[in-house]
């Protein structure tokens, strides 16, 4: 069939017309509000830029995409790090909590942060990884050049996304991130990490989160001192991190004499079952997932054992099952080792009240034995096959049959002195 020239002309005209309609609808009509908001933001920004007390700070912002660089930026010497408004006293005690997704770190961290001496940071590496995924490796800072991960590194990270161990660059990134949080070195952090700091309605960061509501980059310059203030009001920083290899934690321990480490683990079957229910992986990939999870767990354990020898007074290991069984006693001994003193009355009351965060994707179920009734027997078998060496070290029994799995009253734990 051959189309005449006339017909082709008509088709082209119709297609062009449709596209024009679409364009008007989509880009001109629907962005009216946006323009207005951007205008408002611009004017707020202009007001901020006129504020002379802030001048030394924004002079150094080098992200040209957001703010036009002034002619005389001077040499880029981190002047802001020396300004007294952007400084806090060094936290006397720094604590890093290392665990796994759905192994109880939200629960443990939530009780720890009830202590008003503690400045709490929740799952910073997860935030960083999500952001890096979304923005293809780009990160944005106030006082550093926007950073990028190389394409290759990013791909590597995607392939082995169960831990950040996959890549040297990611390892360094997460180490720096945690280090800066522990030191309250907020100016060194990327914007995504700062923005996510007030996650979980943290009372200490409320002033800061209210301040940055506007969302523009310049506003951070005005608000940042509120974080330093919050850090000044506490003497302990606590970073709760999943997705961090214990090896990285160990290098931080070596580097930072004021740092102590809490290592929290849970029965891998319970962890993996909860992860599955939260959509972390698909059931069909259980075998691969279990293998990956338990091999990184094993590596972590070997490193943790070395840490107990190198830093016996700066390391606490917590078995999640003990934590839920004897919550107060576990916290009392944890407080002792961490040098936090007696368990405060209000924290004790909080534990008694049995409050839990609900509706978060990384919480644990209220019945910590639920996995034994819900998980298909074959699933438990697959995990056992890949995790036996880990169980032996941590004190979890292999399952001998369907009945054994379902008999919830019969414990699957035994005493182990590995850690
Ligand atoms: C925090 O305290 C230090 C002194 O300990 C002081 O130099 C600094 O200005 C304080 N920071 C803020 C934001 O108040
Ligand atoms: C890793 O990420 C990819 C895509 O981002 C996802 O499809 C996959 O399920 C993830 N793997 C694991 C083990 O979480
Ligand atoms: C991670 O990134 C580094 C470069 O920083 C690269 O040499 C390496 O091959 C990547 N992958 C792994 C598994 O280390
Ligand atoms: C904060 O981080 C920057 C950049 O990494 C560093 O130059 C500075 O010394 C750090 N400040 C503190 C107080 O650790
Ligand atoms: C928040 O700001 C108020 C008023 O300036 C101040 O009284 C309060 O201590 C601040 N909160 C924190 C946690 O720093
Ligand atoms: C633990 O320490 C031993 C002896 O110092 C060393 O050979 C081994 O590589 C270390 N293992 C880990 C995982 O750090
Ligand atoms: C399990 O233990 C609870 C109390 O710990 C008891 O009430 C219950 O009857 C026991 N169930 C079975 C099947 O033994």
Image (cartoon, rainbow, N blue to C red):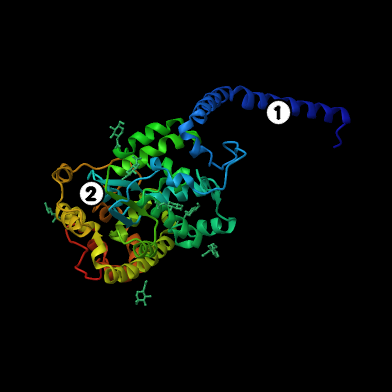
Q: Nearer the viewer, residue 331 or 277?
A: 331
Q: Position of residue 198 (x, y in %)?
A: 36, 40
**Residue 361 shows in this picture:** yes
Q: Is residue 199 left or right of residue 188?
A: left
Q: Position of residue 381 (x, y in %)?
A: 33, 64
Q: Is residue 379 left or right of residue 332?
A: right
Q: Residue at x 43, y 40 (%)?
A: 195
Q: Position of residue 318 (x, y in %)?
A: 24, 59
Residue 43 vertical position relative to residue 282 in the rendered view, above or below: above
Q: Nearer the viewer, residue 342 or 48?
A: 48
**Residue 280 shows in this picture:** no
Q: Position of residue 55 (x, y in %)?
A: 50, 35
Residue 105 vertical position relative to residue 248 in the rendered view, above or below: above
Label 1, label 2: how far apart the Cα atoms are: 56 Å
Q: Quadrant of the C terminus?
A: bottom left
Asked if the residue at label 1 sits under 8 Å from ligand 2, the reply is no
Asked if the residue at label 2 sits under 8 Å from ligand 7, the reply is no
Which image quadrant is residue 253 in? Answer: bottom left
SS for dot 2: loop
Q: Is residue 297 left or right of residue 351?
A: right
Mark 1 or mark 2: which comes first in sequence?
1
Report which residue position mark 2 lands on.
367
Q: Is residue 121 left or right of residue 354?
A: right
- Ligand 5 occupies quarter: top left
Which disc, if any, is residue 19?
1
Q: Nearer the viewer, residue 382 or 206?
A: 206
């Amino acid at each position: 069939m051959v189309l005449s020239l006339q017909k082709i002309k008509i088709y082209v005209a119709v297609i062009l017309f449709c596209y024009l309609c679409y364009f008007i609808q989509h880009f001109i009509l629907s962005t009216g509000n946006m323009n207005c908001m951007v205008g408002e933001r611009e004017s707020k920004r202009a007001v901020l830029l006129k504020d002379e007390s802030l001048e030394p700070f924004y002079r150094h912002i080098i992200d040209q995409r957001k703010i036009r660089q002034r002619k005389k930026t001077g040499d880029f010497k981190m002047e802001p790090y020396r300004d007294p408004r952007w400084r806090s006293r060094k936290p006397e005690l720094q604590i890093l909590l290392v665990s796994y997704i759905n192994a109880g770190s939200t629960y443990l961290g939530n009780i720890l942060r009830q202590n008003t001496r503690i400045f709490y940071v929740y799952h910073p590496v997860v935030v960083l990884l999500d952001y890096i995924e979304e923005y293809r490796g780009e990160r944005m800072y106030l006082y550093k050049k926007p950073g990028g991960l190389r394409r290759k590194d990013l791909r590597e990270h995607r392939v082995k996304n169960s831990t950040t161990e996959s890549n040297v660059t990611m390892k360094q990134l997460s180490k720096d991130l945690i280090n800066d949080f522990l030191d309250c070195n907020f100016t060194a952090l990327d914007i995504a990490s700062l923005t996510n700091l007030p996650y979980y309605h943290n009372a200490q960061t409320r002033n800061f989160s209210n301040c940055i509501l506007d969302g523009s980059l310049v506003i951070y310059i005005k608000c940042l001192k509120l974080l330093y203030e919050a850090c000044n009001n506490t003497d302990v920083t606590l970073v709760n991190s999943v997705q961090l290899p214990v090896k990285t934690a160990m290098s931080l321990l070596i580097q930072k004499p004021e740092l102590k480490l809490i290592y929290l683990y849970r029965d891998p079957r319970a962890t993996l079952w909860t992860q599955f229910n939260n959509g972390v992986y698909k059931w069909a990939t259980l075998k691969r997932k279990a293998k990956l999870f338990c091999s990184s767990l094993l590596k972590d354990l070997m490193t943790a054992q070395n840490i107990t020898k190198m830093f016996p007074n700066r390391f606490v290991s917590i078995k999640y099952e003990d934590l839920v069984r004897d919550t107060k006693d576990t916290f009392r001994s944890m407080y002792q080792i961490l040098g936090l003193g007696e368990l405060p009355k209000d924290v004790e009351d909080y534990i008694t009240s049995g409050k839990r965060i609900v509706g978060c994707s990384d919480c644990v179920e209220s019945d910590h034995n639920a996995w034994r009734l819900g998980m298909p027997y074959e699933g438990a078998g697959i995990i056992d096959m890949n995790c036996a060496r880990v169980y032996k070290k941590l004190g979890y029994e292999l399952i001998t049959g369907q009945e054994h799995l379902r008999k919830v009253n019969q414990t699957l734990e035994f005493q182990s002195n590995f850690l």
